[in-house]
Amino acid sequence: MEFFKIHRDIPFMRHALVFNVISATVFLLAVFFLVTRGLTLSVEFTGGTVMQVSYPQAADLTRIRAAVAKLDYSDVQVQNFGNSRDVIIRLSVEKNVTSAQQSDRVMAALKADDASARLDSTEFVGPQVGSELVTNGLKALAMVVVGIMVYLAIRFEWKFAVAAIVANLHDVVIILGFFAFFRWEFSLSVLAAVLAVLGYSVNESVVIFDRVREAFRRYRKMTTFEVINHGITANISRTIITHGSTQMVVLSMLLFGGQTLHYFALALTIGILFGIYSSVFVAAAIAMWLGIKREDMIKTPPRKDGDRNDPNAGAQV
């Protein structure tokens, strides 16, 4: 299906150097904020108290958040758990306050607001558990990156693998940079969004690389510069339809999903926008700078003496 027909190739690569400088600047700024400010990790990573509270009717999360906010805890998460009557409350570790004291204070505040509130369970998540989550999250990220590089190197060529992984890491670091700069909370759901963006972004890079490979095979007189422009232009209609529809869904989650999905949808929104940009102006441009050429994409089998299928077999000079 092609809604947007473009008859002339758009010269994307003409401005590749300018966009690469912009990308490098944004990337370095993201690294700077990550180093100087760091991520605001949620209770899952830092440890704290997790409470499960239930109500006989649908819980009013706004009232619950307002009641807990009066206690002046530094980091509190309130969200539904399982159904609309059950609520899970996460509290970060506070100095000189035990988990039991935190739980008692929160329940007193909730019962003062609504006497029907009932505490079902409370547990303390230690910093060790949070440390294991950070370690496992980084391992998952590293495994995804290695898997993507191996896949692209086998399917295409090592230059495309390097280009795609630089572009994908560019997206991930920029997402983390946004979270560091604005002090947004980095939770397990955000980590899941970052891993999803990696897969989403590499899919866009693979589609563009496929179009570039087809153009190399079909248009033998085109230069590498022209082939990449043609490959990206041929994919424009799909890019607009696919990413437009995906972004509408993500924006719906961002605007109407409530606090539970807010940072998850926010990470996806940033990742999708930069994923489209990096596939065109980072991945394709880096492949061009690495010197990708027709011979890299179209492998010619070695010639064998006496091969009957060789059209030049038996010829004498």
Image (tube, rainbow, N blue to C red):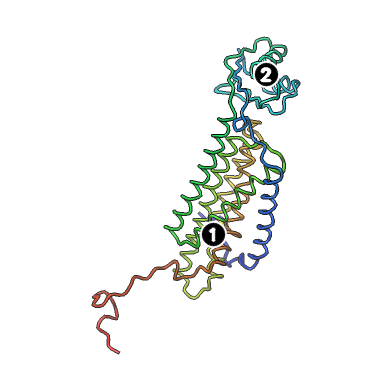
Residue 92 location (% of width, % of height): 66, 27
- Residue at the front extreme, as displayed: 96
Query: Image quadrant of residue 105?
Result: top right
Label 2 crowd (10 A; few <14 / some 14-19 / many >=20): many
Tell me if residue 53 comes above or below residue 130 in the rendering.
Answer: above
Q: What residue is shown with label 2? A: 102
Single out the mark in the foreground, 2 or 1: 2
Residue 145 location (% of width, % of height): 51, 49
Which element carries disc 2, helix, strand or loop?
Answer: helix
Query: Image quadrant of residue 12?
Result: bottom right
Q: What residue is shown with label 1? A: 163
Which one is nearer the viewer's eye here, 19 or 239?
19
* Three-letter amino acid code at the position of disc 1: Ala
The label number, if any, that marks residue 125 in the structure image: none
User: Left or right of 303: which side holds 40?
Assistant: right
User: Left or right of 45: which side holds 203?
Assistant: left
Residue 97 location (% of width, % of height): 69, 20
Quarter holding the C terminus is: bottom left
Identify the residue at image location x=65%, y=65%: 17
